[in-house]
Amino acid sequence: MNRPAKRTKQDPAALIAQAWECYRNYIDADDEESCEEGAIDELLEVIEILQSFDASAPESLETINTKSLVSILISMSYVHLANYATSYTLDTKSSEMTGFDSPKEYFEKALTFWPDNPSAISLYANFDRINCGCVKDICERYVKAAGFAKQWREWALAYLEKEIDTEADIGGIDVKEWVELLIVNGALGVDCIDEEGEESERDEEGSNEEYSFSEIEATASFMSALLLSTLSKHGEALRMLTKFKLSHRIHPNVWKVAQSNRPEVSNGATSMNNNDDAVLFIPKLYHAREVNTDDECTRGVLPENLYQRMRKLFAPKASYWTESDYNNRGYYSYFIDLDDTSNGKSVRERPTNIIEDVIVHHLLPLAEKTLEEFDGDKSSKIIGAEWWCHSRQLGANLGHQIHYDTDESLLGREKKVTHPIVSSVLYLSGANQMTEETAKAGATVVFNQTPKSKAVASKAWVSHPKDNSFMVFPGNLLHGVLPCTGPKKPITPSDYEKPENNRLTFMVGFWTRNVAEEITEHRELYSPCGPMPPATKEHSWVIQCQQGYKEDKNPNSVQRTDLTGDCLPCTSPAWEEFKNNAQAGHSKGPPLLVVPKGLDHRYFVLDAPNCFTDSLFDNEDCF
């Protein structure tokens, strides 16, 4: 990245023209995915050219002039630089940051030149959220960004409809072009829509055009609603949600139970009713009995040695995450045939690695015990286990999307929706520092709703993570993870290398059929129900799994007998229906917003319950 040379004093009109040409070059380069370094240089050139210009931040929506547009140009240049700096900050190759200021400095400069800049405020909030800033402060930023985006969209589009002399008093610039590229397209994420609903360029007259909603307003409003919900400000959250094409949200009751570390158990948690025909059994959480002793064997579902090995195997900086390319892949899992005898004995008789050991000796017996309690004839024999895992930074993540567990391969091949008979979660870390007031790690929520349900769930069970505890629930039920406010004290980047500062979970779907055997094509590594990778240098995590599990050397993994299983806390109702602004009679207002799919965890939805089943077949790109 090359810093531009110092310039001698020039005519203001010439400076503006040069700066605008550089910005247009940046826009064109960005559209064509050209050399990134060259695009960055164009932004730096804009700032260097205009550094001595008498720019002034716009004081209101009615006082736009050449000076304020120049100020907006500088502000947007800093926003783009902040985006590049943020991406490099998140990249492990820190050497690439050479020549950049910190993202925070760029955002602050952007807001100095344009304090109302919606994109700067929203992206600044994103940056702070990723870095675990104060949730309340971040939420306030999103709310402010949403408000400014709405105001500026109304003003900018009205301005483009005016019949005015586009030759400004300084520089001879096309003011409408500046307003469209800088404010409408850049700061707001609004596009001109043609008659067929496609994005298009503004015509010469710039009149009678239709424009899309603001993507910045959509993102900021959605994040406002989400964070307001975690802060128990459900009335304010609803006001944000009514701007969207939505009809239902997870009921405030569910959020309340999820955020409480000592929830009350309702009657629905321990009983079945006519609405629960599809619920095979009541979700349960298994954990060690409360015993007043320092004996480490009483601390959880897994014996301490296995528990610590599992935490180490899937620690934040463990080789598993990089070797499996976790952050850049879609969903992938591993399938274990419990009756596989390729190693002389079945997996049930002699596990060949720690994963099989944990599943066969500790998790499978609890799943089978749960089934026997509700299915006394033992007709549902488990023959296979599909496992996968997730790691989420506390305070920085948005939870996990509400979804169904299903055979992804069969779904892709034949569009058939099937489920494991038991789904489960082994909580490995992230919950050992919960306070009495709030849960530190996000709670798992399970709804009495299946893909065949004709109505939304009437109730929800809530599982609060507890280190080394094990939760089981019927595999056909809708479920996900709600976000939480996270730890009250900020966590430094180095602290995130510690397992306790990450919500680490190990999931197992127990199947009554051999899912992998039914995959007609060759099973691929790191795909749904894929095989375990070979124990090679490229898959060193597999070598770690196998340590101590040779043919003549199988660790003595004794099943726990001091465990207890509690029915999960339950609350009702589970969903709340509401009217959006269009349904409430505000038809003359701005277009309804659409939830950004990259952020959509289905806590707020349209057309429930059908939307959840439809989502199984939805492969649309997100904006």
Image (spheres, rainbow, N blue to C red):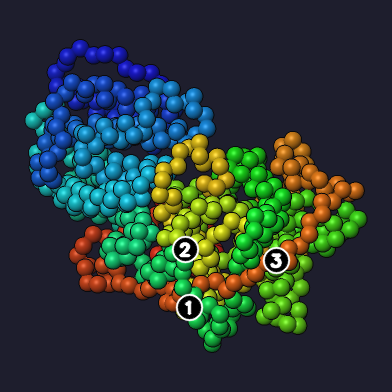
Which residue is the site of mark 2?
261
Residue 156 locus on image (x, y percent): 18, 47
Secondary structure beneath dot 2 equals loop
The part of the image, by quadrant, that contains residue 100 is top left
Foreground pick, 373 / 179: 373
User: How many circles with numbers are drawn on the protein?
Assistant: 3
Residue 309 x %, y %: 69, 47
* One can see residue 324 in this view: no
Locate the N terminus and report the quarter of the image it occupies.
top left
Question: Quadrant of the rendered structure where residue 181 is?
Answer: top left
Please give the name of the residue rendered at 28% of the width and 34% of the height, measured from the top-left corner. 108
| Residue appearing at x 24%, y 37% in the figure | 111
Horizontal relation, residue 347 to residue 126: left or right: right
Tell me if 605 is positioned left or right of 313 in this view: left
Residue 204 at x, y percent in the picture? 21, 43
The residue that mark 1 highlights is: 266
Badge 3 marks a residue whose secondary structure is loop
Position of residue 591 relative to residue 608, above or below, is above
Q: Is residue 300 above or below residue 490?
A: below
> What amino acid type is highlighted by mark number 1?
Ser
Q: Which residue is mark 3?
A: 562
Work out how far the residue at label 2 is from the one at label 1, CA to CA, in angstroms. Answer: 15 Å
